[in-house]
Image (cartoon, rainbow, N blue to C red):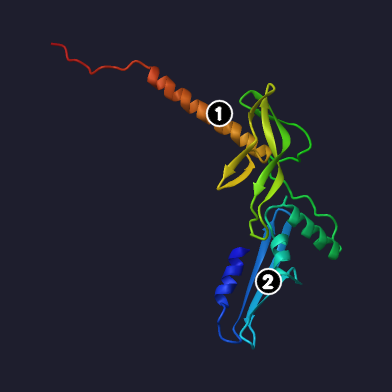
């Protein structure tokens, strides 16, 4: 979205000749739906730059558009604006997003079985200081959904990690938990293979009989 705004500002920069116009259109998909976005800019008769924004055919302010199209679905700013949008357009509650294979609702413990290991993924909420992807507001601490992974009552993985300066759940889905287990199994096999090679007796150079 910010890239689209920047592109439009390059089309119609400040100081452009009077009457200069530009328009940009995009279909934006978020975790809560898809929107058709239209942006227009022009230089008016007084030489001032003007911008207009539409979402699904309805004219909106820029700050509303940025929240409606925000990819951070758990952001309270975005949640509030989406609720107002649905009420104004007489839409029902947002339909659940179809889940990919390996993802399930965060309602109960989920068994994770790999290589004979019986593990359990337990849903949890993790406070994460999160910057707005659209820079529409200062960073917020958002309780994000995720999982802790247990085996025989012992926590193997979970909590939060930091990527590119942003804190987020280490295991945001059951699929991520399964991928974590698979990666650890591959690492173990590689380590065992290397250990087996290093433990084999080394053969010296063959000597010819005199």
Depth-wise, is mark 1 or mark 2 nearer the camera?
2
Vertical position of residue 199 compared to residue 104: above or below = above
193 relative position to 138: left or right? left
Q: Which residue is mark 2?
A: 38
The residue that appears at 68% across and 33% down in the rendered structure is 148
**Residue found farthest to the top:** 210
Q: For the residue labelled by badge 2, is the local secondary structure a helix, a strand or a loop?
A: strand
Q: Which mark is residue 185?
A: 1
Disc 1 residue crowd, few under 14, some 14–19, many 20+, Cα 10 Å: some
Disc 2 residue crowd, few under 14, some 14–19, many 20+, Cα 10 Å: some
Mark 1 or mark 2: which comes first in sequence?
A: 2
How many discs mark residues in the rendered view?
2
State the quadrant of the C terminus.
top left
Q: For the residue labelled by badge 1, is the local secondary structure a helix, a strand or a loop?
A: helix
The residue that appears at 74% across and 40% down in the rendered structure is 104
Vertical position of residue 162 compared to residue 42: above or below = above
Q: What x and y, as percent, mark residue 196?
A: 43, 20
Q: What x and y, as percent, mark residue 52?
A: 69, 75
Q: Quadrant of residue 119?
A: top right
Q: Quadrant of residue 88?
A: bottom right
75 relative position to 84: left or right? left
Q: What x and y, as percent, mark residue 106?
A: 76, 39
Q: What x and y, as percent, mark residue 207?
A: 19, 15
The residue that appears at 45% across and 24% down in the rendered structure is 193
Vertical position of residue 157 compared to residue 145: above or below = above
State the quadrant of the N terminus.
bottom right
């Amino acid at each position: 979205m910010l890239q689209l705004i920047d592109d439009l500002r390059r089309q119609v920069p400040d100081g452009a000749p009077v009457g200069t116009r530009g328009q940009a259109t995009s279909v934006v998909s978020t975790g809560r739906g898809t929107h058709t976005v239209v942006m227009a800019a022009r230089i008016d008769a007084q030489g001032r730059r003007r911008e207009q924004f539409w979402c699904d055919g309805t004219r909106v302010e820029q700050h509303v558009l940025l929240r409606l199209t925000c990819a951070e679905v758990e952001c309270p700013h975005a949640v509030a604006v989406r609720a107002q949008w649905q009420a104004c357009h007489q839409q029902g509650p947002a339909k659940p997003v179809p889940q990919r294979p390996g993802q399930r609702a965060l309602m109960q413990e989920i068994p994770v079985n790999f290589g004979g290991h019986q593990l359990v993924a337990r849903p949890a909420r993790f406070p994460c200081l999160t910057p707005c992807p659209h820079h529409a507001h200062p960073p917020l601490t958002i309780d994000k959904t995720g999982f802790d992974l247990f085996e025989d009552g012992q926590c193997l993985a979970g909590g939060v990690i930091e990527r590119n300066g942003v804190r987020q759940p280490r295991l945001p889905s059951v699929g991520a938990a399964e991928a974590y287990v698979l990666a650890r199994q591959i690492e173990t096999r590689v380590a065992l293979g290397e250990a087996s090679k290093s433990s084999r007796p080394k053969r010296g150079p063959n000597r010819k009989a005199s």
